[in-house]
């Protein structure tokens, strides 16, 4: 059967099936149809990767392409086996999305309850990158699945509810991904606002310290100059300078109080 399929398949379609990174598509041909769906999965290091699954519809038979062996494996019960195959991949994708959803919730609770650690932003960027990648893939997968569903609706009538559930799971998962992306944007805005408040408070403290020590630095610099032609260098000059500065600050303080009452 492999030889028959290989002889029937267009060489370009065969290359599409061999490409494990091919985007999701549904293609109709004179003698066969091809459905390629791309799903997120996890490798041994729990890193999210993308894998494309190729399915060939040849008359009354359905085959899954295995790139490792370059072979076409027939589904024993055709549509029922196809449903179980797609259901397994979609459930796996939903588990990954739910896990990311829980990470977003934990990050939100951490931000609102205590001070985030140094790895907060690094974790934020990692989750945001994974969610954006999954969202882009799911959008293409949903379009390809919709085309497959509409073109084969009559053939899958006995399992119509099952395949409809798969479509609903895909769309619901994609909406959950978008929801978490929006939530991450809100978390980052709150984190930035908190960081800006801390920075503004630090600048405020530095401004107060500068206002206190700047006049003192001016006085030290003025009276520390080694020259005899400056004012207030005679005996009692320091007292007059302090009296002048004190009077100036007192007048400014009373002026601000009077203006505030208005």
Image (tube, rainbow, N blue to C red):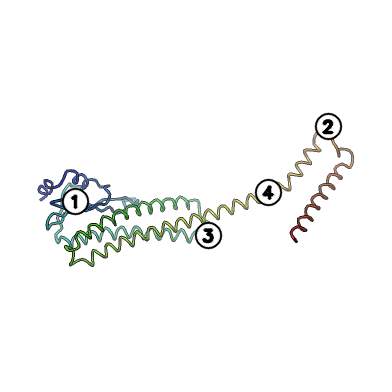
Q: Secondary structure beneath disc 2?
A: loop
In the rendered structure, which disc, 4 or 1, sits on the residue that comes first in sequence?
1
Question: Residue beneath label 1, please?
Answer: 65
Question: Residue beneath label 3, please?
Answer: 114
Decide if residue 110 is on the left or right side of residue 70. Answer: right
Disc number lying in front (1 or 3):
1
The answer to whether mark 2 and mark 3 are in CB contact below 8 A is: no
In the rendered structure, which disc, 4 or 2, sits on the residue that comes first in sequence?
4
Question: Residue beneath label 4, please?
Answer: 207
Disc number lying in front (2 or 3):
2
Residue 169 drawn at (x, y percent) = 30, 63
User: How far apart are the alpha carbons under marks 1 and 3?
Assistant: 50 Å
Relative vertical location of residue 120 with respect to residue 87 in this rendering, above or below: above
User: Neighbour class for label 4 at 10 Å: few (<14), some, many (≥20)?
Assistant: few
User: How far apart are the alpha carbons under marks 2 and 1?
Assistant: 94 Å
In the rendered structure, which disc, 2 or 3, sits on the residue that comes first in sequence?
3
Question: Residue beneath label 2, please?
Answer: 227
Q: Who is closer to the viewer here, 260 or 17?
A: 260
Return the mark for residue 79. Answer: none
Q: Secondary structure beneath disc 4?
A: helix
User: Neighbour class for label 3 at 10 Å: few (<14), some, many (≥20)?
Assistant: few
Decide if residue 168 is on the left or right side of residue 220. Answer: left
The answer to whether mark 4 and mark 1 are in CB contact below 8 A is: no
Disc number lying in front (4 or 3):
4
In the rendered structure, which disc, 2 or 1, sits on the residue that comes first in sequence?
1
| Identity of the residue drawn at 53% across and 53% down | 192
């Amino acid at each position: 059967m492999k030889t028959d399929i290989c002889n029937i398949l267009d060489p370009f379609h065969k290359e599409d099936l061999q490409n494990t990174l091919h985007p999701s598509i549904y293609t109709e041909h004179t003698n066969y149809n091809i459905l390629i769906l791309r799903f997120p999965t996890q490798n041994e290091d729990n890193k999210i990767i993308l894998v494309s699954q190729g399915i060939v519809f040849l008359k009354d038979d359905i085959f899954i392409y295995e790139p490792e062996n370059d072979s076409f494996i027939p589904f024993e019960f055709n549509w029922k086996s196809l449903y179980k195959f797609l259901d397994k991949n979609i459930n796996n994708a939903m588990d990954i999305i739910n896990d990311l959803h829980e990470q977003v919730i934990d990050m939100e609770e951490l931000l609102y309850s205590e001070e985030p650690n140094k790895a907060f932003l690094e974790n934020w960027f990692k989750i945001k990158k994974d969610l954006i990648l999954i969202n882009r893939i799911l959008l293409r997968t949903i379009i390809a699945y919709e085309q497959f569903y509409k073109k084969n609706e009559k053939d899958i009538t006995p399992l119509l509810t099952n395949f409809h559930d798969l479509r609903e799971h895909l769309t619901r998962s994609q909406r959950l991904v978008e929801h978490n992306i929006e939530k991450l944007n809100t978390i980052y805005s709150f984190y930035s606002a908190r960081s800006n408040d801390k920075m503004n408070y630090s600048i405020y403290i530095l401004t107060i310290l500068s206002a206190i020590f700047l006049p003192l630095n001016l006085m030290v610099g003025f009276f520390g100059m080694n020259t005899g032609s400056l004012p207030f260098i005679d005996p009692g000059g320091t007292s007059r300078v302090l009296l002048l500065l004190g009077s100036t600050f007192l007048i400014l303080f009373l002026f601000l109080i009077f203006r505030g009452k208005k």
